[in-house]
Image: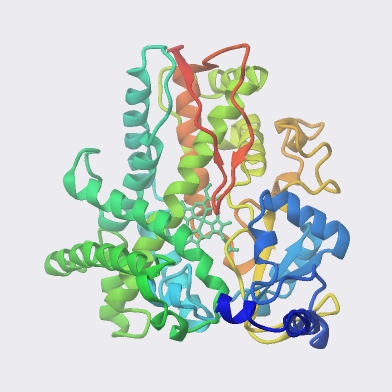
Amino acid sequence: MLDALLSMDPLTVVLGILSVLFLLKLMHVSDNGPPGPTGYPLVGNFPLLMSGNRPKLFDQLRRKYGDVFSLQLGSRRMVVINGYEALKEAFVKQADVFSERPPADYISIRSSNCKGIVRSSGEFWKNTRTFSMRALREFGFGKRSLETNILEEVSVFLEVIGKSNGDAFSLGTIAQISVSNIICSISFGETYTHDDQNFKKLMMMIDNHVKLLSKAAISIVLPSGQIPYRYIPGDVTGVEAMGTNYGNIKRFLQEQIDKHRASFQKENVRDLIDAFILEEMTRGKTDYLEDENLAIVLSNLFVAGTETTSTTIKWAILYLISNPHVQTKLRNEINDVIGLSRAPSMTDKPAMTYMDAFMHETFRMGNLVPFSLLHGVKKDVTFKGYTIRREDLVVPNLDSGLFDESLFEDPRTFNPDRFIGEDGKLNGKEHTVLAFSLGRRVCFGESLARMEVFLFLTSLLQRFKLLPEDDDSLPSLEPIAGVVNHPQQFRFKAIKVN
Ligand code: HEM
C-alpha cells in the first residue's frame, strides 16, 4: 500500500488527500452536523482525541465551537455535549431521544450481545432495567439486610487497615474486593471469604474484562457491525480475547443461576437471581427474562459497580489527608451524632449534613466517569440547531458539568461548604452534581453506591485519623485518566482513635 502510494504522481496524492479532507469537512456541513476541527484523511480527528489530556481538549473545543461540537473518528462521528444546561436539555428534557446506546458494534456483539442493562437499548433495555430495579428494591437496595452485609464488609476493611499499625501503606485492592463481595450478596445471596477460590476467579475475570475492554475500545471507530473484523488477522484490537474472557464470566454466572434453579423455592426468594426466576415463572419466558440476559445483568453490576465505588473511596481518603480541617469537622460530627460505641447506620445520615456535603464534593471533584458512557439517539434529531444522526456516538461530557463555573465558584478547589446554606442545611446545589450522569440512563447503582460510600467513610473516620505519609509532600491530586478517573498510587497512615 505504501509502495503504491510512493509510486504515484505527487499531484495525484495531494489531490487525493485534499478530496478526502473535503469529503470529511463536507460530512460536517452536508447534514448540518455540529461543528468541529478538520481531521486527517481516513482517521479524521482520532489522533487529536488520543493526543493527551481529554478534559482539557474538550474544554478548548467547547470554547471554540460551543456546547455541542463533533469529532470525526474514522468512519464514526462523535458528538460531545457540554455544560450543565445543554446536558439537561439533551438527556432530561429530550430523554425520549437521547437515552439510547449507539447502534451495535462488534465489541458489544462479542461481549454482552447488546443485552443486560449497560449496553442494551429501546424496549428491551427499559424492561430489563425496570425489572432489575424493582427486584433489587425488594431484595437488596433499601433493605436493612443489605446494610448489615455492607457493615460486615466494612469491618473486614477496617481490620485490614488496622493491621498497618499506624505505618504508611497503600490501600491496594481491599476496597474493590469488599465492594464486589457486596454485589455477590445481592446477586447470589451469599458473601465469600476474601480468599475463596471461586470468588478470586470471578474477581480476576472481571478485572481482565475491564483491561481487555479498554484495549478493544479503540475499534469502536470502525463501522458498526462485525464485517470488518472478520478480515482483520491476529486479533490486533483484542476484541476476540475480550469476547473469550467475557464468555468465561457468563459461564461462571450461569453456574450460579443453575444452582439457584435447583434449590429455588418460591416462598423464599433469596436474591436477585431468585427474583428473576420467580418473574419468569409468573410471566413465562420473554426476550428479557432468560438466562443469558440475567447473566449479563449480573456481570453489569460487578463491572459497573466495583471500580467506580472503590475508586470513590480512594479519592475520599486522598481528599481527607489533603484537607485535615475537613477531617476534623467530619470526626466532630461523627462524635456528636453516633459517638464511638456503636457502628454507623443509614438512619444517622439525615443528621450528618457535613458528611453529606463532603460526599458530594468527593463525587464532584473525583469526577469518576468524566465522559459517562456512550449514548446514542433513537433517530436523527436536530439539537441546538445541529443534526445528530442515529449512528453517531454521543458523549455526555459530565466533566464539563462538574466543573461548570456558572454553578460552582472556584470549581477546582475542594470545598464541601459550597453545599451548605446559611441555615446549616444542604442548599440544593448538591442536586447539580452529575457524577452519576442524568436522565433515564442515570447510574443504576446510585443509591447502593451512596450507601456504601457513607458507611465505609463514616466507619473509617470513627476509628482512624488519616494522615499523609509525609507532611511536607502531599500526594498528587491529578487523576490518571481513563473511562474511570483513578488517583495516582499513594500511601497514607491510619492512626487508631478508637
Ligand atoms: C460512585 C460510584 C458510581 C459512579 C460514580 C457511577 C457512575 C455511573 C455513570 C456515570 C453511568 C453512566 C450513565 C449514562 O449512561 O449516562 C453509570 C451507569 C451504570 N451504573 Fe453506575 N456508578 C457508580 C456505582 C455503581 C454501582 C454500585 C452499580 C451497581 C451495583 C452501578 C451500576 C450501573 C449500571 C448497571 C449502569 C448502566 C445504566 C444504564 O445503562 O441504564 N454503578 N454509572
Residue 102 visible in the snapshot = no
Position of 367 compared to 227: left or right?
right
> 430 or 61, which is in the foreground?
61
Position of 153 compared to 91: left or right?
left
Describe the colour scheme in one phrase.
rainbow
Q: Where is residue 83 drawn, in percent x and y?
A: 78, 57
* Residue 230 in which image quadrant: bottom left
Instruction: Kindly identify the residue that appears in the image at 80 percent across and 82 percent down.
Output: 22
Instruction: Kindly identify the residue that appears in the image at 32 percent across and 83 percent down.
Output: 283
Question: Which quadrant would the N terminus be assigned to in this image?
Answer: bottom right
Instruction: Kindly identify the residue that appears in the image at 22 percent across and 39 percent down.
Output: 193
> 296 or 16, which is in the foreground?
16
> 221 or 271, which is in the foreground?
221
Q: Where is residue 478 drawn, in percent x and y?
A: 64, 36
Q: How many marks?
A: 0
Residue 374 visible in the snapshot = yes
Residue 196 in the image: above or below residue 385: above
* Residue 136 in which image quadrant: bottom left
Question: Which quadrant would the C terminus be assigned to in this image?
Answer: top left
Instruction: Kindly identify the residue that appears in the image at 42 percent across and 67 percent down.
Output: 236
Residue 383 in the image: above or below residue 360: below
Position of 399 compared to 333: left or right?
right
Q: Where is residue 51 drawn, in percent x and y?
A: 66, 54
> 353 or 202, which is in the foreground?
202
Q: Where is residue 19 drawn, in percent x and y?
A: 77, 85
